[in-house]
Amino acid sequence: MAVLVLADHDGKHIRKSTLNTVAAAQKIGGEIHVLVAGNGCGDAAKAAAAVAGVAKVLHAEGAQLGDELAENVAALLVALAKGYSHILAPATSSGKNILPRAAALLDCQQISEIISVESPDTFVRPIYAGNALATVKSKDPIKVITVRMTGFDAVASTGGTASIEVVQSPGDSGLSTFVGREVQKSERPELTSARVVVSGGRGMGSGENFKILEPLADKLNAAMGASRAAVDAGFVPNDWQVGQTGKIVAPELYVAIGISGAIQHLAGMKDSRVIVAINKDEEAPIFQVADYGVVGDLFKLVPELVEELKK
Amino acid sequence: MKVLVSVKRVIDYNVKVRVKADGTGVETANVKMSMNPFDEIAVEEAVRLKEAGVVTEIIAVSCGPQACQETLRTALAIGADRAVLVETNEELQPLAVAKLLKAVCQKESPQLVILGKQAIDDDSNQTGQMLAALLGWSQATFASKVVIADGKAQVTREVDGGLETISIKLPAIVTTDLRLNEPRYVTLPNIMKAKKKTMETLKPEALGVDVAPRLQTLKVSEPPKRKAGVKVPDPKALVDKLRNEAKVI
């Protein structure tokens, strides 16, 4: 039995989500192989070979693999699937795009966003926006699985000495082409891997007002997030959204400011180690999950908090 | 061109879901059901494409029990032209739904299928990608903008860290993200009109699809509850707690 993990990488480095996924693979058991597919991703393949617990890296190069197009990467996974009992990918936007396509081609029913491995064929996954947990058993010969990063502690990115094997990939499907990318440039840590997250909600009142959270995020070296209400109101971009329909985060410290605590938001952050809420409404549901709450006007409290942190 | 949209009947997003005491599932008796919100966005997008003159006919499809007729009527009221119900009382998992939709696509030959990116009950996020795989068509998931021209769709996708644009050959599959559009309110005259539109019923057996579930649900449980903490009077007390009690800063 061997487990194949589809790596999430930027060509040079392996992203942390890959380390969480390798951790899930370790819980399943068996030899762990990591597939690094891309266009000029030799450095990422080397980085994957150094990841603790990895036995072998499969390195696939090709112009058609450069932009993570689902048609091409899924075809590669299917070509490699023979001999694997499990195929895993992190539940990133890329993993979620590619893996179900591969699963269907293999005639397997994918298991999405697992948070726990009970046995090699039984897994726990959240349903209904995290309001219930389902324990499911797969009868398929190959278990095709996406892994929710917050469910598994990342393995070490060093200490491994895996071999690297070059693998051939099927050619371009000709079905889709990459046009362009608009990446939000930010000096801040990435939302899903940050140690501290500062999020604002509808209570911020406007996009302009999010500026008052910046000194706080600077002071805590935090990523900035938002509730769906704030995104829907157009205050901030969609990729700031924390919640069931956005990013799932589990930082050491989550600071929710002007966020009432709708179920769909809680589903995205309730696994944080420490939650702080600042809200003017003392009945807000966010206080039912917060470790520490302050009731009051955020426009007065946030600057005060920044001053206190400087002391 | 013809477009097909798939719609799922789910527990309304405003309902607080309760896990059954015997751990077999969640409570669905006497619970308000609605169209999956992402599917509403899919129907709306199809209607806008028709209003823009790109699309000539919209077929709404739902797979599930007879009660899905209600959901299909809603799709017709938003502006779909006709409906197809693939009726079954079996539990349907995404791979089975993708196989049923593939069979319907082979009957109807649409140039475009629009689906919600995920259903808010099982949160699988699979059916669109699987349908694309089974048909051998291109896919653009998590769409926030769709432009159709010259036998291609240019789709802007919501991805981690920002937006990405790809060009896909038709026929194609598109799955919707939240910001693609804001679905219109259904008006009474349109609800009345929807009643006169045709609704065809098919059976999985007639389509030659085996829908037997591949995943067995062993149990459904409540997630561990987080305990409410303490309220502190001011930022000074908060910083003290974070430094000395939680030791997180």
Image (cartoon, grey):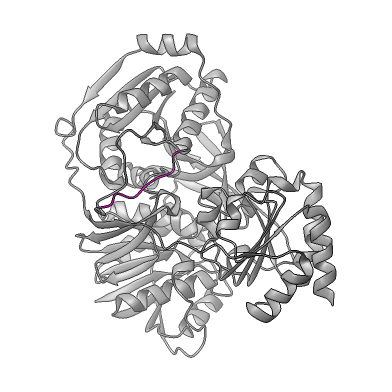
Magenta region: B15-21
Asked if A116 appears above or below B245 in the picture, the reply is above
Q: The C terminus of chain B appears in which quarter of the rendering?
A: bottom right
> Can you say whether B78 is above or below A2 in the image?
above
Of residues B105 and A301, which is closer to you in this image?
Answer: A301
Viewer-proximal residue, B232 or A180? B232
User: In the image, is residue B12 part of the stretch drawn in magenta?
Assistant: no
Where residue A89 sits in the image (x, y, percent)? 41, 65
x and y percentages locating residue A239 in the rendered image: 62, 53
B121 left or right of A40 in image: left
Q: In the figure, residue B231 lies in which quadrant?
A: bottom right
Which residue is located at x 81 percent, y 55 percent?
Answer: A211
Q: In which quarter of the image is residue B248?
A: bottom right
> Which quadrant is the N terminus of chain B positioned in?
top left
Q: Which of A122 and A156 is in front in this view?
A: A122
| Residue A141 image point, x, y percent | 20, 63
> Does the image show residue A171?
no
- The picture quadrant where one finds residue A81 is bottom left
Figure disc tally: 0
**Does residue B17 show up magenta in the picture?**
yes
Q: Is residue B115 left or right of residue A206?
A: left
* Residue at left offset 31%, top offset 23%: B69
Predominant SS of the magenta segment? loop
